[in-house]
Structure formats: C-alpha cells, structure tokens
Amino acid sequence: MQKEKDPCPSASEALGARSSSSPRISPFVLTENRLNFLHALQREGFQVRMHGYEFFVRKSLFVCALSLLPWSGIVLIRLIPWNREESEASIIKMLNILRSMDPNIKPCILA
C-alpha cells in the first residue's frame, strides 16, 4: 500500500527554504494584502486579531489560529478542538477568501 503524501510542509518548506526553482511568492508578503484579508474576514462576521502574519479568529467562540507563510505559499491553520464544528465551518469560509486572493496557496490544517 502506497503511503499518502503529508499535506503539511516539511520544516524547511515552512521556513521558506528555496530549491533551485524557487516557488512563487504569495501576495500576502505585502501588508496591504494581509489587511485586505483581515477586512474580508471581518465582513464575513469574524472577530480577528492580526499580528504580522498570524491571525487569531473568533466567531461566537475562538475558531482558529492562522499563520501565513508567504515565502513558501503556505497557510497553517490550527483547529480548535473544543469548538470543532464551528471551527471547521469557519475554516471553509476562510480558505475560500484566501484562495480568492491567492489561488496557489497551500493549506495545512492542524487538529
């Protein structure tokens, strides 16, 4: 049986290590685009705190911590286990917003 590829990046990928063919850099490198993402989340009814490349997101309760790694084109999303149902529903909306701004972003969802 063939082993499935892990959807999450290796440590070197997550930290932005480059191969000879460097990956495309995400638009989220720019503060303006991260602020646009913040405002898009707020328009969807989320309460959000942004700290650089990290977002702490609430709906009725805390739903996730989201970290953008724009040099790698990756977004790490930490689910909240004690609010799993609302967390999963919220992440679907957030991924739709992220992909509308960067169609090539690779999500890594951590439970």
Image: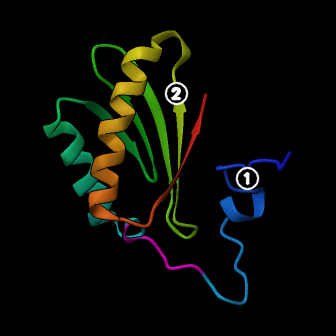
**Magenta residue check for 26:** yes
| 28 versus 38 height, above or below | below
Callout 1 amino acid: Lys
Q: What element carries label 2?
A: strand
**Residue found at the very far front of the displayed protein:** 1
Magenta stretch: includes residue 107: no
Amino acid type shown at disc 2? Leu
Magenta highlight range: 23-27
User: Depth check: 104 or 36 in front?
Assistant: 104
Left or right of 49? Residue 2 is right
Task: Read off the residue under disc 1.
Answer: 5
Q: Where is residue 21 in the image (x, y as percent from the top left)?
A: 65, 88
Mark 1: give few (<14), some (14-19) or many (20+) Cα within 10 Å.
few
Q: Quadrant of the N terminus?
A: top right
Please identify the quarter of the rendering in which residue 36 is found: bottom left
Give the residue pinned by disc 2: 79
Residue drawn at point x = 42 percent, y = 26 percent = 88
Residue at x 83%, y 50% (from the top left corner): 2
- Residue 105 in the figure: left or right of residue 96: right
Question: Which is more N-terminal, label 2 or label 1?
Answer: 1
CA distance for labels 1 and 2: 20 Å
